[in-house]
Image (cartoon, helix red, strand yellow):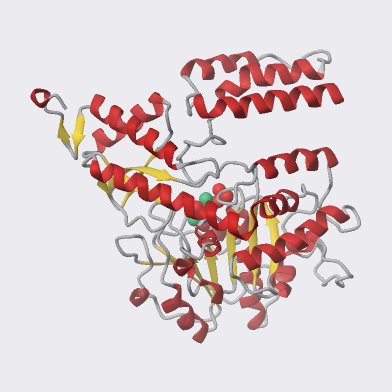
Amino acid sequence: MRQVLRFAAERAVRYLEELPERRVGPSAEAVRALGAFEESFPEGPCAPEEVIGMLDDAGSPATMGMAGPRFFGWVIGGTLPAALAANWLATAWDQNAGLFIATPIGATLEEVSQRWLLDALGLPAGCGAAFVTGATVANFTALAAARHAVLKRVGWDVESRGLFGAPEIQVVVGEEAHPSLVKSLGMLGLGRERVIRVPVDSEGRMRAERLPELRPPCILCLQAGNVNTGAFDPAREIIPRARERSAWVHVDGAFGLWAAASPRYRHLVEGFAEADSWATDAHKWLNVPYDSGLAFVRSPDDLQGAMSLSAAYLPQGEHREPSQYVPELSRRARGVEIWAALKSLGRSGLAELVERCCRCAERFAEGLTAMGFEVLNEVVLNQVLVSFGSPEVTERVIAGIQEDGTCWCGGTVWQDRHAMRISVSSWATTEADIDRSLEAIRRVARAAGVTRQGRPADPASGR
Ligand SMILES: *Cc1c(COP(=O)(O)O)cnc(C)c1O
């Protein structure tokens, strides 16, 4: 055991140390070399070290450098050293985190993390919390609590009776709701298509004046942090109106909710704490390993009502029972890494992490604008959308940047414009990484024949 663990740890350390200087996306050659894994099921055993050796030799080169400092695709985040090390230790513990009696440490660290998270995110201290796999399942879990509560108010027990014959729930989302939220609604029998979609403004924010008349039982879903622009729905205007109509307000704040952890960016989440439930990710901005998401529900009873193993409420003992708040029974102890990340950062470290990412996004936007490229969004948080001209030219630059390997960014279509999307959410990213990435973008754009927005390079000018 000792030998193989040491060996794996050494290889992992080497991988992470080499990461800042290797290409971010895997090379085509490394992807081709994955053919090494295409063998038929081995007839006999293989030494553990040989297994790990193969994994590192053939596997590591074919990874995307998500844990490194210049990965800006999607909203991913890396892994803080304390969180990674805690993950190793917790994996050695192999705790089934379903019940307190099964894992006092796992359950305790969920309880402690819950308290710290609610504090850091500026949410009511009495909320119930679910430690799940990601924001998709967090949305699902919180919306299951919403479904439970709004139907209970009209005398319908949805857990026992299902949705057949139930009073219709009005579901309202923004035109820019994340696809995973809409999927969650589908999984809950609330329908992906039958929802009312509220029009949005140029930054993707729900337009409060276009809110339909809300009729209970009603669930209204807001967004804190649009995945393209980083923009926030106008919670302060909308939530009081929803409250008047007894609507349940849910917030998808997969990464945006973390703005609350910074005094500088806290104003963006003003009003969101008045909602009934929130979903967020720990594997994005908190920089814990995959997978880790969080659902918070103002009334823990509603969360338990939807998630309890038995239809009857189990009496709450002295301790919080983790499985009473989540879809799963057996699962890993995600609270361990969340605790480790929060403990290692502290309040000031968390604020610094959020602020540095936002500062880096601003630096990207300024640099790109100075090069003559068009930044399509108001850079309020950690997201930057940039166009290099026509859709074809923008696609060409994105492909060039991925091939170049200095950094990695993906494409998106934002309100009918093709754009490259830059998300800064890793603890490892510094201003120097932004400058290095900007240099690469300049180089690639020039090679692709663009120097200024949409204009081919002028060979005579030598630029
Ligand atoms: C990333 C994201 C999700 C989905 O989160 P997963 O962790 O991938 O399940 C949902 N909503 C928003 C706004 C996101 O950014």
**Where residue 223 sits: x, y (%)?**
47, 63
Residue that lies at the very extreme toward the right in this rendered image: 101
Q: Is residue 165 left or right of residue 390?
A: right
- In terms of depth relative to the viewer, which is nearer, 207 or 289? 289
Residue at the location (53% across, 30% down)? 64
In the current view of this chain or complex, which residue is farthest to the left? 460
Q: Quadrant of the C terminus?
A: top left
x then y, percent, for residue 157: 70, 75
- Residue 63 visible in the picture: no
Q: Give the total of numbered labels.
A: 0
Can you say which quadrant of the picture contains the N terminus? top right
Please give the name of the residue rendered at 14% of the width and 24% of the height, measured from the top-left corner. Answer: 462
The residue positioned 30% from the left and 43% from the top of the image is 367
Left or right placement of residue 359 versus residue 319 in this view: left
Along the viewing direction, whichever of 459 and 142 lies nearer the viewer = 459
Nearest the viewer among 156 and 292 is: 292
Q: Is residue 381 visible?
A: yes
User: Measured along the vertical axis of the image, is residue 408 above or below residue 139?
Assistant: above
Question: Could you say where residue 98 lies in the image, as x and y percent from the top left?
Answer: 82, 54
Residue 23 picture location, percent across and down: 47, 25
Residue at 80% x, 62% y: name it. 309
In the visual, does 82 lie left or right of 253? right
| Residue 149 picture quarter | bottom right
- Residue 446's place in the image compared with 380, above or below, is above
Q: For the view shown, which residue lies furthest in the bottom direction?
A: 244
